[in-house]
Image (cartoon, rainbow, N blue to C red):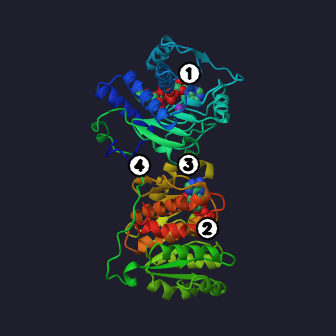
Amino acid sequence: MTAPHRHALYTVAQVRALDRAAIDGLGIPGYELMRRAAAAAFAALRRHWPQVRRIAVHCGPGNNGGDGFLLALQAHEAGFEVRVLALADASGEGDAARARAACERGGVAVRRWREGEPLPEAELHVDALYGTGLSRPPGAPASALIEAINASGVPILALDVPSGLDADTGHCPGVAVRADLTVSFIGAKRGLHTGQAPACTGRVELATLGLPETLWQAAVPDAHLLQPATLPPRPRDAHKGRSGHVLVIGGDHGTAGAIRLCGEAALRAGAGLVSVATRAGHLPALNAARPELMAHAADGPQALEPLLARATVLAVGPGLGQGAWGHALWLTALDASLPLVLDADGLNLLAREPRRFQHDRPVVLTPHPGEAARLLGCDTATVGRDRFAAARSLADHFGAVVVLKGAGSLIAAPGGRLDVCPWGNPGMASGGMGDLLTGIIAALLAQGCSAWQAAGLGVGLHARAGDRAAREGERGLLAGDLLAPLRRLLNGLDA
Ligand SMILES: NC(=O)C1=CN([C@@H]2O[C@H](COP(=O)(O)OP(=O)(O)OC[C@H]3O[C@@H](n4cnc5c(N)ncnc54)[C@H](OP(=O)(O)O)[C@@H]3O)[C@@H](O)[C@H]2O)[C@@H](O)CC1
Ligand SMILES: Nc1ncnc2c1ncn2[C@@H]1O[C@H](COP(=O)(O)OP(=O)(O)O)[C@@H](O)[C@H]1O
Ligand SMILES: [K+]
């Protein structure tokens, strides 16, 4: 598969429109698409699990089930031992009914599955229950079947979408299949890469079913997958004044670690100079731990003024607190009209005192779902039900680039532009990871990136550094472990 649709992501409505365009515009019958989808998925099965010869295929009531019936037939014809379980009795017309009839005619027995029945012995399960047509949480008996498949202990191949996952949002309204591989058809669904999706999809492959490039050229993607990127090498005559001066503001009593990590990440991400404005009590420890950081006591806004005069970018929020001290620094920093990264309590204060940023001021907000909910005035579950809508709404509301963190972080700009980060891992769900990201994005702003570039490049470098560091194990991964791989990635020393 080649450009232009390689990194494009589509809503379910857009993918369904692409399906229709292939059928109506290109004159390829839906049944033929189904056959190609089944063939692509079966080829992937053989490629990933060359030893497997005995499979169970679980077919739902719609066209996703139709894909399953045709995969079962193709596997049977290739000499596999195939068991097919259907959620419904044969009925009606249409491509799925035709696929089921072809499957049975071809000699594959299709059995209606009823709750409580054991699953057939198989070396692999194929999930063809629901695809893009999921319209509600899977109820009985599908929910029990999904749980049995998940508990089987053998590999699971999902056709198009792991059943139970909303391919539009990455949210699971109920139980969902946890696949090892998802082979998705025609268009890459945006919801396969964020939120709960990474827990369900396993590896994701896209099969474009031999359709011509012109099909995608007519569709404007809803979003894009982030691509690996670095900064160009520094010019040979560089001096530190050319790489910007980040001022990190935060670290109330008891939270010195947050500013240290943020400041150190800004240094490792290439900022020319990094200052820290914090509580006086933190200075000795900061100076001892990282003398390259210029640590200053900031008892209040007056102490901040001379630092603001020298800084080119602000990183506000790590360990800031929401008390009088933090609030006073926050107000002064926001009024300084310098490029800004706002995180943690910087965001919680913004939720208390909302303001819209000037459109020409580069501002990046980096909320996790809890902070995003506070900013939107809703609960965290609402954010999780549609991360795309939450990120876009925040970007439009505040006039800033927004990074909605969590598995499959989203980067949204005012106006709707959106990228999805495909890297990162659960080892990164540990204290301090967000502080690191704030420092990285601030350093990239300081080196001349726009807010959009800094957010996307920063999220990508942070997540890829997390993946490098997690090679030593996800559990026990520390934020500080990302600094060495971050430096290598930033300099293009690791592909
Ligand atoms: N020709 C094409 O365009 C191509 C399509 N392709 C394939 O088709 C798939 C889309 O097919 P689809 O539209 O039939 O939807 P699908 O996902 O099978 O589900 C719909 C059925 O499930 C039911 N249902 C939904 N949720 C439910 C729940 N929670 N619990 C219980 N029932 C539930 C729903 O019932 P209803 O909501 O109508 O009551 C309906 O009966 C797509 O993902 C791809 O795999 C490929 O072959 C390539 C070419
Ligand atoms: N399961 C996960 N998969 C990918 N990235 C994750 C996962 N969990 C956390 N992260 C990333 O780790 C960082 C955590 O940031 P945050 O929630 O602010 O933590 P903290 O406040 O402890 O610094 C975010 O960049 C987030 O995207
Ligand atoms: K499926």
Please report contact status of discs 2 and 3: CB closer than 8 Å, yes or no: no
Query: Which residue is under mark 4?
Result: 223
Answer yes or no: disc 2 within 8 Å of ligand 2.
yes
Residue 177 in the figure: left or right of residue 315? right
Answer yes or no: disc 3 within 8 Å of ligand 2.
no
**Residue nearest the observer in this picture, 218 or 119:** 119
Give the spatial CA distance, label 1 vs label 4.
Answer: 41 Å
Dot 1 falls on a residue whose secondary structure is strand
Nearer-N-terminus badge (1/4)? 1
Give the spatial CA distance, label 2 vs label 1.
Answer: 51 Å
Nearer-N-terminus badge (4/2)? 4
Which amino acid type is shown beneath numbered disc 3? Gly
Which amino acid type is shown beneath numbered disc 2? Gly
Dot 3 falls on a residue whose secondary structure is loop
Which amino acid type is shown beneath numbered disc 4? Ala
Nearer-N-terminus badge (2/3)? 3
The mark found on residue 195 in the picture is: 3
Query: Which residue is under mark 2?
Result: 432
Q: Quadrant of residue 189?
A: top left
Give the farthest residue toward the right: 116
Q: Which corner quadrant of the figure contains ligand 2?
A: bottom right
Residue 354 in the figure: left or right of residue 217? right
Nearer-N-terminus badge (1/3)? 1
Give the spatial CA distance, label 1 vs label 3.
Answer: 36 Å
Whole-percent x, y for residue 354 in the image? 53, 65
